[in-house]
Amino acid sequence: MPKNILSRARYRAVTKQRKLAVAGVAALGTAAIALSAVPGNADTVTTGAPATAAQVAKVATQDATLSGVKGTVTDRAAAQSVKLDAIAAQQKAADQAAAKQRTDAAAKQRTDAAAKKAAADAAARKAAQERSAKQAAARSAQRPQMQTVAAKTYANNLDGWIRQSLDIMHAKGIPGSYSGLYRNIMRESSGNPMAINNWDINAINGIPSKGLLQVIQPTFNAYHVPGTSWNIYDPVANITAACNYAAHRYGSMDNVNSAY
């Protein structure tokens, strides 16, 4: 191969290598750019002329310098990468610690809130129980002591029937007196609870008067007093129903002195 072709090939190879080195260290700034500049006119290889030993040596020196710069850049980049990795690791650890701290704080707040709510609920229940106990005690103190009273008994005769009827009437608010009841009973039935009138107008109409106070069935049904028998011939039921009717129509059985 002719020498001039070999020189141009070597020149192009050297130049390409130098340009690649320059591109690799461009971030270093002015110093790297200066080192990558094209040689001056004095050292420029003339086309078709072989490179001198000095020119080759200078290119080799520049290549060595660029290699050193490249190595320095690589080392610095590696160191910077390690430093950045360390900073990133520290930041990640700090972020994780902060996140854990926030999570722990939130969990503590929830726990504290639950504990406070439980305490408040317990206090409310205790207060309610105490109020209930006080109210029960107050009601018990206000309630009159119940005395055991023996059931009242009545004689199974006219006197007993009248007295039992009067007690029921007084409990229901129906006016009347013993004398008023006795007087009307004796006039109407002579004290016979099974007495029945089969001759007056009521009997003619098919609803005869019955019992101690001679009450017709519709009147007995309308003025029946709860708690007494529905049998019109029952002495107590008959008396209380008749007195209830007399109270509504005449004010009281005491005001009745004839047929009513």
Image: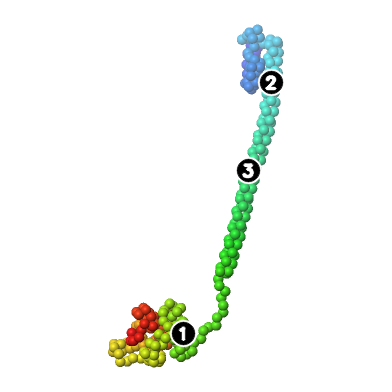
Question: What residue lies at 61% left-to-right and 10% top-to-bottom?
Answer: 47
* Residue with the mark numbered 3: 102
x, y percent for residue 45: 64, 10
Q: Nearer the viewer, mark 2 or mark 1?
A: 1
Mark 2 neighbour class, 10 Å CA radius: few under 14, some 14 to 19, many 20 or more: many
Q: Looking at the image, is mark 1 or mark 3 earlier in the sequence?
A: 3
Please report the residue visible at 55 percent of the width from the left and 81 percent of the height from the top. 149
182, 115: nearer the viewer: 182
Residue 191 visible at all:
yes
Extreme residue toward the top, this view: 42
Which secondary structure lies at badge 3? helix
Label 3: how many Cα within 10 Å (few below 14, some 14–19, many 20+): few
Specify how the rendered protein is coloured.
rainbow
Which residue is denoted by mark 1 in the rendering? 164
Question: Mark 2 belongs to which amino acid?
Answer: Val
- Circle 1 or circle 3, nearest the eye: 1
Picture coordinates of residue 218 (x, y %)? 34, 83
Quadrant of the snapshot with the C terminus: bottom left
2 and 1 marks in contact (CB < 8 Å): no
Tell whether 152 sits left or right of 191: right
Q: Is residue 102 above or below residue 42?
A: below
Q: Of marks 2 and 1, which one's residue comes earlier in the chain?
A: 2
Mark 3 → mark 2, Cα distance in angstroms: 48 Å
Label 2: which residue?
Answer: 69
4 vs 260, nearest the viewer: 260
Kind of residue at disc 1: Gln
